[in-house]
Image (spheres, helix red, strand yellow):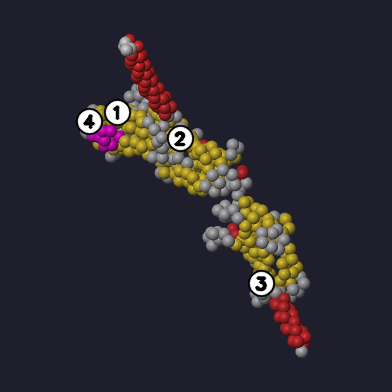
Amino acid sequence: MKNISKIFILLFVLLAVTEYVAAVNLEVTSVQINNQNVYEVTGNHTNNYMYQRGDKLAVDVCVKALDTVKDAQVEANIYGYRYAAREQNMVSDVSDTFNLDINDNDCFTLHLQVPDKIDQDYYKLRITASDRDGISSETDYQLNIKGAADSAAVQIKDFSLDPQEVVAGRAFTAMVMVKNIGDNDLSNLKATISIPELNIKTSEYMDSLDSDQSKTFEELLLRIPDCAKKGTYDVDITVDFDEYEETTTTTTIDVVTGDTCGASTGTGTSSGTGTSGQDTSVITIPNSQELSQGTSVAYPMMIQNNGDTAKTYAMSLSGATTWATARIDPSSVIVVPAGQSRTAYLYVSANPDAELGDKTFTLTIDSGTDSKQIPLVAKITKNVSTSTTDWSKFRNALEIGLVVLVIILIIIGLVIGFNKMKDNKQESEPYY
């Protein structure tokens, strides 16, 4: 009786399995990724297939109909990506519906892309095949995602231009954020903003960018030529890295006609001068100064009002907040009577860790009806005061030590002298 019971249980299990297999109408017979055969997962992290961030995956799936199927589909998904719901077109693809007779075979190509933001880790590529009313057939393949290739390691993640519409003769600033999506840390990156049609460009540098790190370059400032024509210009943003590699993106900026084309540029030998559109104000300021890390420098500004009435001038600074602090003395707002001039001082203090090299920033002087933007340069050099201070401290220590040594020698001499006098006195006394 026990044997008969076992036989009935076995027959029941076989019947259930047979019914399940019969219900699976489609079977995945082969899968290729970028023309390379891949095999199902047979254990934990076995048969791993390595791909890099940004790789495009052409997934060729062949299926066989175990029964007549109608309105069937094949689907491919990379599971476990944090932003899959927002970037579904990258990590998921599905075929159009199709019909197959029993024992017929067909192949379909699905297109996926490894996202740039995906973590470096193991992921499952899951292939699903099913018709409208059958049980789906699923096969899993193990992906091992690595960082992007060295040639594509740096990605321009974001950028901005301010203002988006700039008057000829004035400047605009650019912010560029980059991300290292490669496996290796990088150093000495360079960002360049250029407008080829106007033959102008400027650059900023970044010391280091670690793997998986995002970082923003210091503010870049570019001045539009005084006589640039009105129009929309292409702005190229290029980031050089790893000695020979670069990545580039392009945006646009609108230029409108300014009022400085052909205008007088100031008072003779002084640099960094400018006038308002009606030539009623003359601003004289040196456009370049040199200072070392952690020190300050002054830019003297002379504002002359050639108009018939007094004017109020408001001064502001942009483009220096990331590497310095600044103030304007005696005030950032000055009233200049008609036909007279006043002098103010722009003090710029470089941060102790400010990057070396030329730093460009903008002084804006607004008189209400007129506004002038003057690009200025601060040349940052290495601070050598530390070594001088250390030597001064060392020299002072030596001087103090020498004084102490002399005092000690004098004391020793006195002690020896007193002892000798005592000995001589004892020898001169008579003995009884």
Q: CA distance from mark 4 to mark 1?
A: 14 Å
Is mark 1 in CB contact (under 8 Å) with mark 2? Answer: no
Residue closest to the eye, 4 or 428? 428
Mark 3 residue type: Ser
Mark 4 residue type: Ala
Above or below: residue 110 compared with residue 265: below
For label 1, the residue is: 302
- Assess disc 2: are there few (<14), some (14-19) or many (≥20) residues with their C-alpha within 10 Å of its C-alpha: some
Question: Callout 4: helix, strand or loop?
Answer: loop
Q: Could you tell me residue 30's position as x and y percent?
A: 73, 63
Question: Callout 2: helix, strand or loop?
Answer: loop
Q: Could you tell me residue 318's position as x and y percent?
A: 37, 39
For label 4, the residue is: 338
- Assess disc 4: are there few (<14), some (14-19) or many (≥20) residues with their C-alpha within 10 Å of its C-alpha: some
The stretch in magenta equals 328-338
Q: Could you tell me residue 180's position as x and y percent?
A: 55, 46
Q: CA distance from mark 2 to mark 3?
A: 60 Å
Task: Tell me which numbered mark, 1 or 2, is placed earlier along the sequence.
Answer: 1
Question: Callout 1: helix, strand or loop?
Answer: strand
For label 2, the residue is: 355
Residue closest to the eye, 402 or 287? 402
- Image mark for residue 136: 3
